[in-house]
Image (tube, rainbow, N blue to C red):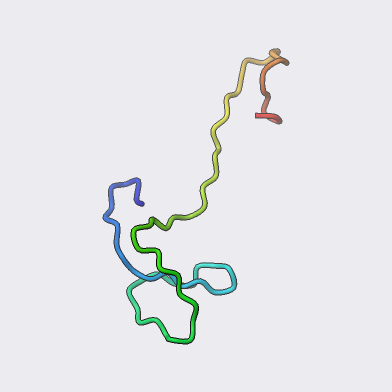
Amino acid sequence: VDPNGGKSFTGDVWIRNGKIAGVGDVETPKDVETIDCSGKVITHGFCDLHVHFREPGRQDKESLETG
């Protein structure tokens, strides 16, 4: 998924020690675990950074610390 409108592609994602070690279209060795993700979208982890900061003096609203 590319928010800039880039094209998606089909390929392999190599995971080593819980981290992405490579991406591309490569031959998979027979002695590794494979997971078929056909029809799925693989993306990075998402982090929701959406907050609302209110006017100073409004203690009943979220602040920088609690936003």
| Left or right placement of residue 34 versus residue 24 in this view | right
On screen, 51 above or below 46? above
Task: Return the residue found at the far top.
Answer: 57
Q: Quadrant of residue 52?
A: top right
Q: Position of residue 64 (x, y in %)?
A: 67, 28
User: What is the x, y in percent for residue 61?
Assistant: 67, 18
Q: Report the quarter where the C terminus lies.
A: top right
Indicate the quadrant where residue 22 lies: bottom left
Locate residue 45, reporting x and y percent. 52, 52
What residue is drawn where x is 68% and y is 24%? 63
Camera-side residue of 63 and 39? 39
Give the image quarter of residue 60: top right
At horizontal 48% and vertical 86% (from top left) the residue drawn is: 31
Question: How many labels were placed on the picture?
Answer: 0
Query: In the drawing, does residue 25 fall left or right of residue 54?
Result: left
Nearer-the-camera pick, 12 or 40: 40
At horizontal 39% and vertical 81% (from top left) the residue drawn is: 28
At 26% from the left and 55% from the top, the residue drawn is: 7
In the displayed structure, 36 sits above or below 53; it is below
- In the image, residue 2 above or below residue 37: above
